[in-house]
Amino acid sequence: MSAAVTVTAMGLLLGCAQLPADTNWSPPDWPAPATMVTVVTAAGEPAEASETVEPAKPAAKADAAEATSAAPLVPADADLAGFIDGRIRNDRAGVQIRYVEIVGADSFNASVATIIDDAIASTGISSFTPEVFDTGAGLAERGCVAGSLAIPAAELLKDPAYGPVDGDGTAVVCEVTAAFGPVVGVSFRMVAGLDGDITRDTTTALFANLETGGVTAGAELWTAEAAGELWQGTVDGLRRDAWALSAAPTQPPSDEQLALAQAALAGAGFTGAGARLTLPAGITSAELTALGAGATTVPLTVEVDSLDGWLTPAGDAILALRGTPFVGVPAWNGAHPVSCAIDACVAVTYDDGPSGFTAELLDTFAAHESAATFFMLGNAVLGNPEVVARAAGAGHELASHTMSHPDLTTISPKKARRQVHQAGTAITDAAGVPVTMYRPPYGAVDAAVISAVGWPAILWSIDTLDWQQPGQKALVKRSAQAATPGDIILFHDTHADTVNAADAVVEGLRNRGFTLVTVTQLFDGEVPGGRVSSR
């Protein structure tokens, strides 16, 4: 109304006179900021005015993948194969989590475990129990997915590749955003929603130093001033793209607006000189409101051309390594810690080897990044020490199956102990690893044997009866299709069909959501004494 009154008053003063046009006039230039913040769309192109206040959703996940993976510092030839890819789906809790871990990076892995615990706690479930599905669930596809940080939250929750059942609950996805020198950066995004309403959409970046073992969270990289300057630069960018004529300074952000910028910094991905950040929906200011622009309704991606004055010493130390060759992620190893209270664990075990088939079996498990336990005969170990050492080096568990496969209940306790421990010594001599448990041949064990040997006697909860040679389909059905979390499955690596079926067995278990672990991992590192047949 005041603008209209002003125009009317001028008309009364001037009558019908027409103001002469000033052909030399142009809107004042925006002052050049110390750090330039450019608003971009999800597809990675500078946003048009109509796209910045309420950015358009990406047309397809492929577009999002192209946008997200193009700018971060991940060379095309970066060696990322060693990541331990994980995936947890639990329909009872309403959660699906995709994550990665790194062999030997204990601090990084502990931070990932905290994110997983936070996601499970966010569902409100009082008691979490691992869950598995049928072999068609496709859960063997695990780990981070390029572009998943940019998928609109509602779409991500509804996508069965990422979200909880029916789209209600919590999803965690991740993406590798940096790989240079000894540093690898992974961003984890957590989205939660109910009945179509998004209740949470946050991203946490973790930077692991593969040489020192340290980890730095994204929030630790930034000075106290960075969030405010990021927010102001973003709002100014939105104002420019909305054709605002006033270059008056933007008023400082509220605490709520500042929190949105802090959340973006916590999940930042870095470019050659600056950074790419995604601010959660809800960015607004008095100046934007005056332009008739509402708060942003979807996450907004911006690029910062320089980080001068924004980084803490920790941030400077990490980013000083940009441009140096990436050292590579350490190779997968089956001995890494696993939490079987969270992961759906199963122990696949093999007796009577090593044999001429064992090397092929090790190839199969390596291809699926899965662990097994081998109960070895001492006499066979003496004849094939190279395969024994290879199995131990890959992180598989080695245990005694006696020297010559006697029924331990038919010999004296003293001889039973000698049979078991001599085989253990042969394994240690060949592979350099201690042996602390055994499997009694035929499963024959009694109190006298248990007392004399002094190690846990590991039996089984699923016997595939592979020695009867029922065929590969039967072996898959008896194992991969029948297993439940906590099972110990018995095979023998002395039968061709057993080894040939291993690929389908392992893939079937992983597709159901299982993590294949050693017997010791199944019990979180502490195998109970006496007779043991399952977790």
Image: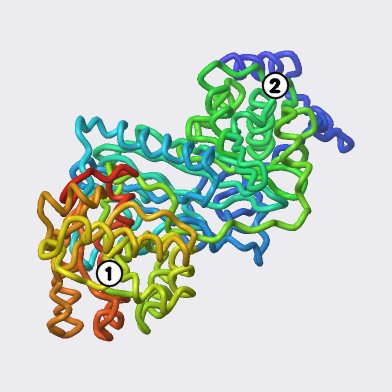
Q: Name the N-terminal-most of marks 2 and 1.
A: 2
Placement of the N terminus among the 4 image quadrants: top right
| Residue 315 occupies quadrant | top right
In this picture, is 346 found above or below 122? below
In this rendering, position of residue 207 left or right of residue 393: right
Mark 1 = which residue? 350
User: Where residue 100 is drawn, which disc sits there?
Assistant: none
Which residue does the image show at 24% across and 61% down from the upper left? 512
Q: Is residue 59 visible?
A: no
Q: Residues within 10 Å of mark 1 (few under 14, many from 20)?
A: many
Q: Nearer the viewer, mark 2 or mark 1?
A: 1
CB of mark 2 within 8 Å of CB of mark 1? no
Q: Position of residue 484 (x, y in %)?
A: 16, 56
What scheme was used to colour the molecule?
Answer: rainbow
Label tally: 2
In this rendering, position of residue 483 left or right of residue 12: left
| Residue 401 occupies quadrant | bottom left
Describe the element under mark 2 as helix, strand or loop.
Answer: loop
Q: Is residue 339 visible?
A: yes
Which residue does the image show at 46% across and 35% down from the upper left? 202
Q: Name the one closer to the observer, 384 or 185.
A: 384
Mark 2 = which residue? 225
Q: Name the one closer to the observer, 418 or 512.
A: 418
Which residue does the image show at 19% across and 56% down from the upper left? 487
Mark 1: amino acid: Tyr
Q: Position of residue 406 (x, y in %)?
A: 18, 70
Q: Position of residue 283 (x, y in %)?
A: 53, 30
In this picture, is 259 found above or below 89? above
Describe the element under mark 1 as helix, strand or loop.
Answer: strand
Mark 2: amino acid: Glu
